[in-house]
Image: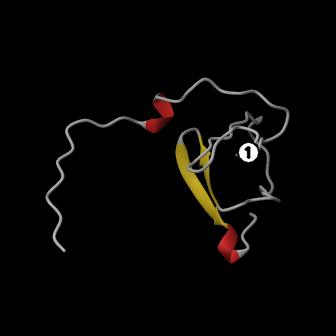
Amino acid sequence: MQLPQIRFETSADLLNVLPTPKPSPSPMTFEALNQAYGFVLYRTKQQGGRKGVLKIKELRDYGVVMINGKKVGALDRRFKEDS
């Protein structure tokens, strides 16, 4: 099967075209956000200068960890990753 060539003419940085955030004291599930599939961005602000390990206790599928817009790690439930 051969597919026709696809030509992209415009692009966008997804972090710059996000919908309005929904503040919550803890991360909300996809169901609570009425999000059937795809990605959800969870954000928080932390004071700098801390040392430690970030633990994600209830990762459902796949997570990307970013600091100041730069990817610093990824977690995958299939590999039982939580930090």
Closer to the camera in the image, 70 or 43? 43
At horizontal 77% and vertical 41% (from top left) the residue drawn is 28
For residue 35, above or below residue 52: above
For residue 69, above or below residue 62: above
User: Mark 1 highlights which residue?
Assistant: 31
For residue 20, above or below residue 42: above
At horizontal 14% and vertical 59% (from top left) the residue drawn is 4
Q: How many marks?
A: 1
Quarter location, residue 74: bottom right
Residue at the far top: name it.
20
At horizontal 77% and vertical 55% (from top left) the residue drawn is 54
Disc 1 marks a residue whose amino acid type is Glu
Is 72 placed left or right of 6 in the picture? right
Q: Position of residue 15 (x, y in %)?
A: 50, 35
At horizontal 66% and vertical 74% (from top left) the residue drawn is 78
Q: Position of residue 20 (x, y in %)?
A: 61, 23
Is 55 placed left or right of 12 in the picture? right
Residue at the far right: name it.
25
Closer to the camera in the image, 51 or 8? 8
Quadrant location of the N terminus?
A: bottom left
Quadrant location of the C terminus?
A: bottom right
Quarter location, residue 50: top right
Count neighbours of disc 1 (C-alpha within 10 A) and say few if under 14, some if 14 to 19, many if 20 or more: few
Q: Position of residue 30 (x, y in %)?
A: 70, 46
